[in-house]
Amino acid sequence: MQGGDGSQAEPRRPTGELKAPTGELGVPLKAAAVPRWRRLDVRLTELIFFLVAIVGAVALGLGITAYFRQHPYILAYLIAYAGFRLADLLVREDFEPPPDTAAGLSGLLLGHLPVLLLFAAAPFERTYIYGGEVTRGMGAAGFILELLGLWLALGARVQLGFLGTPAQTNGSRTLVRGGLFRHIRHPVWLGEFLVLLAWALEFGAPITALVTIIVGIAMGRRRAAVEEAEMLVQFGEEYAQYVRESDAFIPSIW
């Protein structure tokens, strides 16, 4: 090929197809947002271990596993609770991938320790302190209270998922104030608390119930303070107005 000055220019070598670089470009892929379904298997593994631990805790509290076959309301409670944990995993709006490390996963499991202690304490109190059998009316009351808590917790989760998702226009979130959130700001926590309190009623265990109430109130206050501080930062005066017009957990009381 002849150049512009009349000299012979070297022929250009073909460069071939351009390929995207395979190395890291500043930010590792690990920093990208992890889709919730990609890590669902790890969450399911955590849930399975947790439910197995609950059964073990109950067995320790009772001393015998045959107790389940003799008490239908307790068996119904455990089946409903297992379904609740699975449904909560699938519908919760604030899903976060669990840590990759064994230490991080063990930390998550240790976070369930208070619940495991509750599941062991109620049958232990009934079996080794009072003895005898709980009336079917008490067992039915506990199961009904559990169903009420499940309805509150899962209903609020579903409502947040449908009404609190980011808007398509600017990605901002919507403050949910209707439905279960119309009068109370934390129906999810209230529902989870009722589910756990119902376990103490299933066994007629007043000491465990009292401890559950005290711990639940303390943890509820702490959780509400953290969540409401975050919501005030996100929504500002809109959320402050919502706080003035609603109660935290119990309408007209708290």
Image (tube, grey):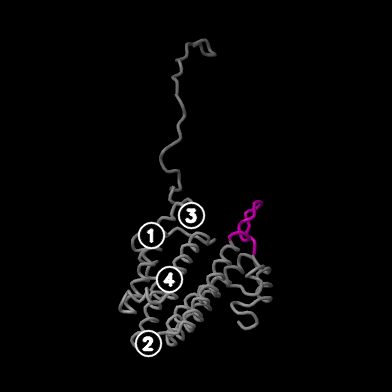
Residue 70 coordinates in the image, percent (x, y): 38, 76
Which circle's residue, 1 or 2, is located before the other in the chain?
1
- Mark 1 near mark 2, Cβ–Cβ under 8 Å? no
Labels 2, 3: front one: 2
Q: CA distance from mark 3 to mark 4?
A: 27 Å
Which circle's residue, 1 or 3, is located before the other in the chain?
3
Which residue appears at 45% of the width and 43% of the height? 25
Labels 1, 3: front one: 1
Magenta-highlighted stretch: main secondary structure?
loop
- Mark 2 near mark 3, Cβ–Cβ under 8 Å? no
- Mark 1 near mark 3, Cβ–Cβ under 8 Å? no
Give neighbour class at mark 3: few <14, some 14-19, many 20+ (Cα, 10 Å).
some
Three-letter amino acid code at the position of disc 1: Thr
Q: Quadrant of the C terminus?
A: bottom right
Which circle's residue, 2 or 4, is located before the other in the chain?
4
Q: Which residue is mark 2?
A: 132
Magenta residues span 161-175
- The question of residue 173 being in magenta is answered with yes
Three-letter amino acid code at the position of disc 2: Gly
Three-letter amino acid code at the position of disc 3: Arg
Labels 3, 4: front one: 4
Residue 131 coordinates in the image, percent (x, y): 36, 88
Residue 23 coordinates in the image, percent (x, y): 41, 40
Three-letter amino acid code at the position of disc 4: Leu
Q: CA distance from mark 1 to mark 2?
A: 37 Å
Q: Which residue is mark 4?
A: 78
Residue 178 is marked as none
